Amino acid sequence: MLAKTKPNSDYWALVGAFAVIYLLWGTTFLAIKIGVAEVPPLIFAVERFIPAGALLYAWCRWRGVPVPTAREWRAAAVPAAFMVLIGYGCLFWGETRVTSGIAAVIPATIPVWVALLESLVFRLAPISWRVIGGAVLGVAGVTLLVGPLGGGRTVAALVILIGALAWAVGTVLVKRLPLPKSTTMSSAAQMLLGGAMLAIAAVASGQVEGWHPLAVSREAVLAWLYLVLAGSVLGYSAYVWLLGRVSATKVSSYALVNPVVALAVGWMFAGERVSAMALAGTGVVLAGLALVLARDAPQKNH
């Protein structure tokens, strides 16, 4: 266990990496909210992923990682479509209508949908009462969140849920695709392809019309830089590094923490109101997530 590890450089590296995915990823929802208040959502998503993908790609090439083959580029297009185009496209659009806190809680259901897909669709794992119970709690929690919103905000919350489901599909498919051996290069390829898809969607939806790239505030520029560097480059790098050193179940615990961080940050720095119903829905969603994550917890023999 981490708590029993001697405090050395490796120990503090683990602590730092967990702090990155717990805290930084939790704060990115407010950064998205700030950006989409001034920049069309799909364009803002393009501005996040293409620079981040280019930076990771350049870093990989500098370290001698080979260029992806044509087959690997085609494979990377699949998760790019599900996770970047649909997943993040829905999230960025949804945050034009709901608070950053609510936008953070709904994607916390992703591990629940992944577990259901693995069990019921792809037959990669047996179905269990923990997965079923987690799914029921996840749906109940989202219902509590979405119910009181009304109007366009309800639609936005449901769109974010669709994005979460698409992300879950992409997560499962990643394991079955011939992606680059380097996970960092794979991420770079997915960001670049997903950014290109988002750009096409932005043009097709008319979001480019009337948009003035230089007519943005300093806050929006800082939010963009934060998303590119802290959210994508640093956050993803820490995530991949942790996956190579501790169990995926422990790493997945970020989904329990991110919504709490996002709700607190939105309340403190953006004045976002957190209703009793929203808190109740958040608690139910996180309880369902904890139930599903406990499914994979290692059992100790006594």
Image (cartoon, rainbow, N blue to C red):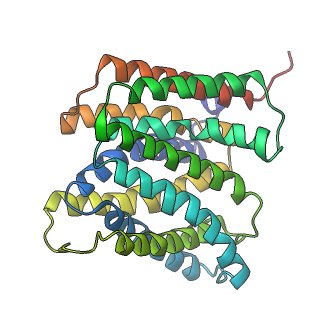
Q: Quadrant of the C terminus?
A: top right
* Picture coordinates of residue 192, whole percent (x, y): 50, 74
Please tell me which residue is depicted at 36% across the width and 36% down the height of the picture: 154
User: Who is closer to the viewer here, 250 or 294?
Assistant: 294
* Picture coordinates of residue 40, whole percent (x, y): 27, 63
Specify whether residue 65 is in view. Answer: yes
Q: Is residue 61 placed above or below 175 in the rendered structure?
A: below
Q: In which quadrant of the rendered view does residue 205 lie?
A: bottom left
Please tell me which residue is depicted at 47% across the width and 29% down the height of the picture: 142
* Picture coordinates of residue 273, whole percent (x, y): 23, 28
- Horizontal side of 238 relative to 49 (left or right) equals right
Specify whether residue 286 is in view. Answer: no
Q: Is residue 13 placed above or below 293 in the rendered structure?
A: below
- Horizontal side of 19 relative to 148 (left or right) equals right
Name the residue furthest front: 151
- Horizontal side of 208 relative to 173 (left or right) equals left
* Picture coordinates of residue 159, whole percent (x, y): 44, 46
Please tell me which residue is depicted at 50% across the width and 79% down the height of the picture: 58
Name the residue furthest right: 301
Q: Quadrant of the N terminus?
A: top right
User: Who is closer to the viewer here, 267 or 94?
Assistant: 94
